[in-house]
Amino acid sequence: MELSMMLDFPALEAAALQHDPFDHLIVPGFLKPDAVADIEAAFPAIDRPGSFPLKSLSYGDAFRRLSEALQGPEMAKAMGDKFDMDLVSQPSMLTVRGYCKPTDGQIHTDSLGKLITVLIYINDSWSADGGRLRLLRSADDIEDYSAEVPPDAGTMLAFRCSENAWHGHKPFDGQRRSMQLNWVRDTAYLRKEQFRHRVSALVKKVRFG
C-alpha cells in the first residue's frame, strides 16, 4: 500500500495548530479508512500494559509499512512545517501500546528530551468514558481541559513537548491500542530511551509471561 493510501497528509496540512493550553493539533482520520482494517489486523498482539519498542514485537506487513512511513522524511517534514521546527534532521523513535491498566493515564508531561509527541490510535469506535486523552491546563485537575481525544481508529494527536504540556485520561482497564512517535533532541537521548524501553520490555515479559 502506497504512503498516500495510508496517511492523509492533506488533512494534516489543513489542521489548525491550537495553542490552548499548549501547541497541539488533532487530525481525525489521519489513517485512511481503507487502510485501518489492514493495520488493525497486522497490529502486534499486546496483552500487558506499558510501552514497547518495535524491536521487541512481532507484527504484520501493514503495520510495518505504517511504522516506516511514520518515521520517514515526509512525515517529519509535514509535522515540522506545522510546528515551525526542523524535524527532518532530528532522530525519532516509535513505541507501541496495546493494553491499559487502571493506573495508566495519570496527569504528566513528556520529557523535555522530546521535541514533538505524536499519538496515533488504532481502536474501534470508543464508547468508554475512561481512556480519552485530555489536554490539561494544570497538573492537578483532570476536569480542567481544553480538548478531549477519544482513541478512535485513525485519530492522530500531536503536541509540542513543554513544561506545561499536561495531559492524562480517566482510568480504563483493557485493550487500548496506540502508537507513539517522538522526535527527540539528540542521539544520546535516543539511545538512553531505547535502552530504557528494551529493559522495560524484558521486565514486563518476565512479570506478565
Image (cartoon, rainbow, N blue to C red):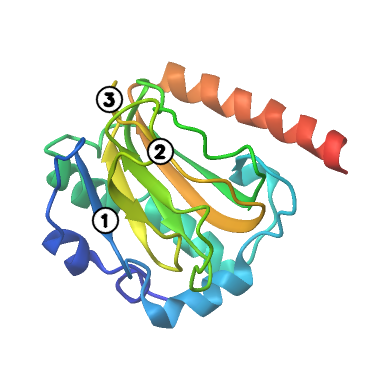
Tell which tag, 3 or 1, sits nearer the viewer: 3
Sequence-earlier tag: 3 or 1: 1
Q: CA distance from mark 2 to mark 1?
A: 19 Å
Mark 2 sits on what residue?
Answer: 142
Q: Is residue 88 above or below residue 130?
A: above
Q: CA distance from mark 3 to mark 1?
A: 18 Å
Tell which tag, 2 or 3, sits nearer the viewer: 2
Q: Is residue 207 above or below residue 196?
A: below
Tell which tag, 2 or 1, sits nearer the viewer: 2
Q: Nearer the viewer, residue 62 or 196?
A: 196
What secondary structure is marked by label 2?
loop
Q: Is residue 200 above or below residue 44?
A: above
Q: Position of residue 56 (x, y in %)?
A: 69, 43
What secondary structure is marked by label 3?
loop
Mark 3 sits on what residue?
Answer: 164
How many labels were placed on the picture? 3
Badge 3: how crowded within 10 Å, few (<14), some, or many (20+)?
A: some
Q: Position of residue 49 (x, y in %)?
A: 68, 43
x 46%, y 25%: residue: 190
Q: Position of residue 133 (x, y in %)?
A: 42, 48
Q: Nearer the viewer, residue 174 or 118?
A: 174
| Mark identifier at residue 6 | none
x 48%, y 63%: residue: 65
Name which quarter of the figure residue 104 lies in.
top right
Sequence-earlier tag: 2 or 1: 1
Sequence-earlier tag: 2 or 3: 2
Amino acid beneath label 2: Ile
Badge 2: how crowded within 10 Å, few (<14), some, or many (20+)?
A: some
